Amino acid sequence: MSALILGQLFVAIYSLSRGEIYYDPHYAVFAVFAFTSVVDLLIALQEDGYMVGFVEFYTKEGEPYLRTAHGVFICYWNGIVHYLLYLAMAGAIHRRKRYRNLGLYWLGSFVMSILVFLPGNILGKYLALRNPTSLIWNEGCEPCLGGWGKLLVGGIFEVGCWFVCWPQVVLDCPTDACFVYIYQYEPYLRDPVAYPKVQMLVYMFYALPFYGLAAYALIFPGCSWLPDWALVFAGAIGQAQFSHMGASMHLRTPFTYRVPEDAWACFFVCNMLYALGPHLLAYRCLLRPAFFQRLPPSSQVLHEKQH
């Protein structure tokens, strides 16, 4: 039934926007995905009690794990942020403009959804069913470690430390520091649903190596891969932290796993900084991209100086 609806939607979009699709076939993809984002938003609004009866059958019989707090906030992210990104990219195609940066940000968010959401569904579905609750180096560019660079490298080191500690916490590390943190600051990491555990392991195996490479790219010039990957990881971490922070305080999360009231400020500030860090890195890369452009061979530089 879903495939039939999406097929009819694609035919309607093709008949109404044939010129945009001929110019860039992604226009049809973005338009169809925008429709699915609206469905995600309806699911989130229904599960929070703002709407009744629209997609209740689907959440009960199709994907009951969407009824968890983490699933609700993933639907909110898809229904708001992804929807706006689809509209912006479709509008860019209509105006014959580039949308590469928006696409990279969306890609990171989409991949994070797959890495966390699908394993979370597989590992936690039983629990949810039982409890529905042209590159030329600019020699005059400023070194990256001046000001912004020092701050970013220091922030990357701090975030990297947390990306090591978080997985230790969810894996029941017996140290006193982990015990105090998980019970007094982020008890949501103990929630039996699989989302928080999978997300922290994704941080360790994917985000932590990236931050190590990003610190290297901020020190040594010519790492042309960093601006694109910074946008991808900004989208990924933004989606992940939004869902994690929201689920940690949502009413659908059992009371014993919610953030204690006296720890709200510490929890919110720390997690917000973790979410903003990749966005600041991406902004730094887009603000002054000359530092990350590839160095030409030394013979080419000498030849250009002679001329």
Image (cartoon, rainbow, N blue to C red):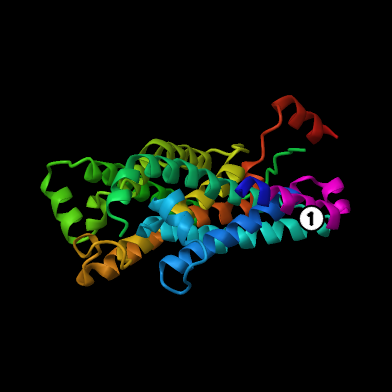
Label 1: few (<14), some or many (≥20) within 10 Å? few
Left or right: where does residue 173 sit relative to residue 32? left
Q: Position of residue 306 (x, y in %)?
A: 82, 32
Left or right: where does residue 208 sit relative to residue 146? left
Amino acid marked by disc 1? Ala
Left or right: where does residue 244 sit relative to residue 13? left
Residue 242 in sight in this render: no
The total of numbered circles placed on residues is: 1
Residue 205 in sight in this render: yes
Q: Residue at x 31, y 68 (%)?
A: 251
Q: Position of residue 85 (x, y in %)?
A: 64, 58
Magenta region includes residue 23 = yes
Magenta region includes residue 20 = yes
Q: Residue at x 28, y 61 (%)?
A: 253
Q: Residue at x 38, y 51 (%)?
A: 65
Residue furthest toward the top? 299
Please name the residue that numbered disc 1 is placed on. Answer: 12
Q: Position of residue 295 (x, y in %)?
A: 67, 34
Q: Position of residue 274 (x, y in %)?
A: 40, 56
Dominant secondary structure of the magenta stretch?
helix
Residue 170 occupies quadrant: top left
Q: What is the secondary structure assignment of the residue under circle 1?
A: helix
Residue furthest toward the right? 19
Q: Quadrant of the C terminus?
A: top right
**Which is more toward the observer, 98 or 28?**
28
User: Please, is residue 283 above or below residue 3 in the view?
Assistant: below
Q: Which residues are magenta?
A: 6-27
User: Please, is residue 29 above or below residue 34 in the view?
Assistant: above
Q: Residue at x 46, y 51 (%)?
A: 237
**Which is more toward the observer, 127 or 94?**
127
User: Please, is residue 187 above or below residue 169 in the view?
Assistant: below
